[in-house]
Amino acid sequence: MFVHLVIRPNITIIIIILIIIMADQTPPSTNTSSSVVPTRSPKSAQAGRVLARGLGIDLDHRSRTEPTAALHAAAATVPDLRQNDLFFEQEPTVAEWLHEIRPTRACTVQYIKQLFPFWTWIFHYNMTWLLGDVVAGG
């Protein structure tokens, strides 16, 4: 019951905001410091702006606080890539890729030794110890 009482006011607020969205036909606030040309946005964008305004979210904060002069000055110092020689790496073919990931013979031998560690000592095993090892292991 308590959860129902907590959820119901939130739904009421959302319904009120949706009614305000449907009634609001004004374009979004224009900001002259922004480099974006303000245009009349579709109803969904207007609805988002009204909803954000109703929730206290400032959508234009970044465009007002961003140091545009410093950004433009920094962008001017970046060299124009169209004038320089660019290096484009070709994608490897399947054969080249398989050749790169193929293990070497030494890696294969090392893998088998790690997979079967007894191969390193089994050929040097003293057969007179076999009976003692069988009794101890059994």
Image (cartoon, rainbow, N blue to C red):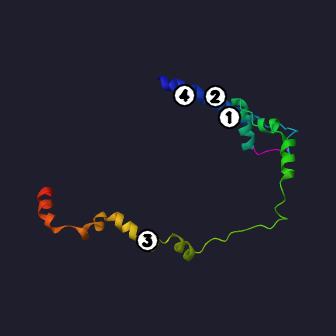
* Residue drawn at point x = 55 percent, y = 72 percent: 97
User: Which is the main secondary structure of the residues drawn in magenta?
Assistant: loop
CA gap, disc 1 to disc 3?
A: 70 Å
Task: Report the residue marked by disc 4.
Answer: 7
Q: Mark 2 = which residue?
A: 13
* Residue found at x 87% / y 39%: 33
Disc 4 crowd, CA 10 A, few/some/many (<14, 14-19, 20+): few
The magenta span reads 38-42
Q: Residues within 10 Å of mark 3 (few under 14, many from 20)?
A: few
Tell me where residue 110 appears, x and y as whole percent: 39, 67
Check disc 3 and give the amino acid type: Ala
Mark 2 or mark 1: name the one nearer the start of the chain. 2
**x and y percentages locating residue 16 in the rendered image:** 67, 29
Quadrant for the C terminus in the image: bottom left
**In the rendered structure, which disc, 1 or 4, sits on the residue that comes first in sequence?**
4
**Residue type pointed to by label 2:** Ile
Element carrying mark 4: helix
Instruction: From the top left corner, tell me how far across and down residue 27 is, in percent.
Output: 82, 39
Q: Secondary structure at mark 3?
A: helix
User: From what the image shows, is residue 120 above or below residue 44?
Assistant: below
Q: CA distance from mark 2 to mark 4?
A: 10 Å
Determine the CA span between mark 3 and mark 2.
70 Å
Residue closer to the observer: 13 or 120: 120
Q: Are marks 2 and 1 in contact (CB under 8 Å)?
A: no
Image location of residue 14, percent across then percent down = 63, 32
Question: Which residue does the image show at 39% across and 70% down from the upper left?
Answer: 109
Residue holding disc 3? 106
Q: Is residue 15 left or right of residue 6?
A: right
Question: The residue under label 1 is which amino acid type?
Answer: Leu
Residue picked out by circle 1? 18
68 vs 110, nearest the viewer: 110
Q: Nearer the viewer, mark 3 or mark 2?
A: 3
